[in-house]
Amino acid sequence: MNVYISIDMEGVAGIATREQCRRGSSDYEIGRELMTREANAAIAGAFDGGAARVVCNDAHADMANLLPSELDPRAEVILGSPKVEYSMMEGVADDFGAALFVGYHAGAGEPAAVLAHTYSGASFYQVRLNDAPVTEAELNALVAGAHGVPVALVTGDDRICAIVRDRLPGVRTAAVKRSHSFTVGASMHPERAREDIRRASAEAVNGAKELAPTTAPGPFTIEVDLTDMRRAELCGLVPGAQRAGRTVRYTSRDYLEAFRCLRAWLYLGAAGA
Ligand SMILES: [Zn+2]
């Protein structure tokens, strides 16, 4: 089985502050090292569980955080940005048997959740899918689902693990920290967290055949509250998008088209900074 890993940074064990996740900060090298080692735990677990091939997509910020020469040499890594096709899910395709989300976090506006945001911390105040606030894990699960790939594992803080257990039936989780507030968490020691992730990854890959891909009946209405008017005005330029004040909305029968609009808003929102 081919296994796809999307790894973010905010939900990695030992991480709780913005500085650890931001290039240019003196703490950033610590963050990327922790992220790389956690990627290796998930990769090793996937091979333990029977994976034939593992592709690991760096899914945080500029998407070039993982230290390539420190990664498990059995895996391929997808690095760089902008990833115009699928962003956090770049490279996912029909020939994968399972997707694993590592280092994930809760969605924008979630109370008392470490570094919670949905795709953009600076531009997106809240993201909704068919009127319900949504997390990156759910948005990305539907991208995998469009390719027939089930999400078998989510790791991160206790908040995102609880959310996906509720919304992605059958998914395994490994919570590596308890969120106290936006920049405070009680983390397991990173080594212990990696042991848990490796074990959970092996079980997830082993049991992936019994899982159904995440799908939902359309149409899909994606809605974003922007953090300021200038960003909202630019996001309103997308053909077919509607805007009311700081909120933009786009509806499609095709989930991947709605997701594509969200990614256009990500770049337009940044351009409006
Ligand atoms: Zn994220």
Image: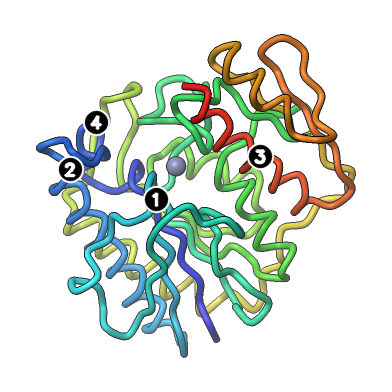
The amino acid at mark 1 is Asp
Nearer-N-terminus badge (4/3): 4
Q: Quadrant of ligand 1?
A: top left
The residue that label 4 is drawn on is: 17
Disc 4 residue crowd, few under 14, some 14–19, many 20+, Cα 10 Å:
some
The alpha-carbon separation of the residues under discs 2 and 3 comes to 27 Å
Q: Is residue 237 left or right of residue 179?
A: right
Q: What's the coloring here?
A: rainbow
- Indicate the quadrant where residue 196 lies: bottom left
* Helix, strand or loop for disc 4: loop
The residue that label 1 is drawn on is: 8
Q: Whole-percent x and y of residue 148?
A: 72, 71
The alpha-carbon separation of the residues under discs 4 and 3 comes to 26 Å
Q: Whole-percent x and y of residue 18?
A: 27, 31
Judged by depth in the image, the label closer to the viewer, 2 or 1, is: 2
Q: Image point 64% across, 24% down: which residue?
A: 234
Disc 2 residue crowd, few under 14, some 14–19, many 20+, Cα 10 Å:
some
Q: Is residue 25 left or right of residue 262?
A: left
* Helix, strand or loop for disc 1: loop
The answer to whether the residue bearing label 1 lies less than 8 angstroms from the nearest atom of ligand 1 is yes
Marking on residue 28: 2
Q: Whole-percent x and y of residue 157?
A: 38, 41
